[in-house]
Image: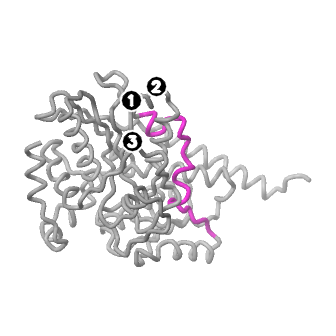
Amino acid sequence: MDISHLDWERREWVREAVQRINADFNRSADTHLIKVDLPGFEAQTLYLKDESTHPTGSLKHRLARSLYLYGLCNGWIGPDTVIVESSSGSTAVSEAYFARLLGLRFIAVVQEGVSRSKIDQIAFYGGETRAVPPADIYAEAERIAAELGGHYMDQFTYAERVTDWRGNNNIAESLFSQLSMEAHALPDWVVMSAGTGGTSATIGRYIRYRCDISAKTSLCVADPENSVFYDHFETGDPDIRSQSKSRIEGIGRPRVEASFRPSVIDRMMRVPDAASVATVHWLQEILGRRCGGSTGTNVWAALTLMREMRDAGKAGSVATLICDGGERYLDTYYNSDWIKAQGLDLAPYLSQLKGA
């Protein structure tokens, strides 16, 4: 049976959409890898891959690009498709960017209390938002997509499968390529926090795929308070639930998400929220810039591993990510009134950080 004229028109639109996304990628430089020399760690080096330099300002730019390409190539997205996503903010910002690039309507279902700056950024790219209680974001996104005949991106299900974990300039391949000329080219640890679990799955799989890397490097996933990923890793229970939302936007989940893959993780670490927030204030002094809360979670865990290496007399390196910039969180992590209202005492953690 011949393909209809309308089907060919849709096929041509998809071809052009994929071309637009690939051209946008081709215009983008890779993100920088920052070497951080810290007092007290003469034989251990910290590396930060700065994902805040993407066009939409966060690590989620990579995920959004991959989700669109996956949806287009699976035939789920066409010229009139309404794109719907459940997101705490950064993924929605990035998906709104690509929706505008393709001329599509975009609706983000966000948790109540998401930072105003993220809502404004979604709107800047032409996206719409619907704020609901944290437990309702999945069902509401599905409902809206069904009502409008749209496509629910569902990052929490698809994040671990939309990226080619064997290479194709994914974040793991990029990281290890940038480390290749360093004194400790193969880090002892890569540290990653989990929101969907997609990035940790990509990194963990890539480490195992590259036999030269797997002989040296391990993956540690850092989890904030009010998240079930750590407990799931420890117990294997897939039905754990939390009634509270994570204070650290973008990471931590109240349920075990389909994209979270504990089998590729070597170690998990629970990081107190006060430690995460204290670390971004400390990092501001170290880097001369603000970073988001999930970066604080990553770096606190990385420093913990570096102390263990130092105590064991082991030289080497630890690599982690700057997930996004801190400008989005001026009303939370960089606001003393918010910190006080949350009951977070940063002092003991700041003291530990300054003493290395």
Task: Residue at 21% x, 31% y: name it.
Answer: 44
The CA distance from mark 1 to mark 2 is: 7 Å
Residue 355 belongs to magenta span: no
Q: Is residue 322 above or below residue 4?
A: above
Magenta range = 150-174
Judging depth in this view, the residue of 261 and 200 nearest the camera is 261
Q: Can residue 308 be seen in this snapshot? A: yes
Q: CA distance from mark 3 to mark 2?
A: 15 Å
Q: In the rendered structure, are the residues bearing label 1 and label 2 in contact, judged by CB atoms less than 8 Å apart? A: yes
Where residue 270 sits, quadrant-wise, is: bottom left
SS type, badge 1: loop
Which amino acid type corresponds to the residue marked 2 in the rendered image? Asp
Labels 3 and 2 touching (C-beta < 8 A): no
Q: Which residue is mark 3?
A: 219
Q: Secondary structure at mark 3?
A: strand
Helix, strand or loop for disc 2: helix
Under mark 3, the amino acid is: Leu
Residue sitting at x 43%, y 47%: 200
- Answer with left or right where residue 342 lies relative to residue 182: left
Per the image, the residue denoted by label 2 is: 212
Asked if the magenta segment contains residue 173, the reply would be yes
Q: Position of residue 320 (x, y in %)?
A: 32, 42
Looking at the rendering, which quadrant does residue 227 occupy? Answer: bottom left
Earlier residue among tags 3 and 2: 2
Q: Residue furthest right?
A: 1
The spot of residue 18 in percent (x, y) is 61, 46
Tag 1 residue? 216
Q: Which mark is residue 349?
A: none
Crowding near the residue tagged with mark 2, few <14, some 14–19, many ≥20 C-alpha atoms within 10 Å: few
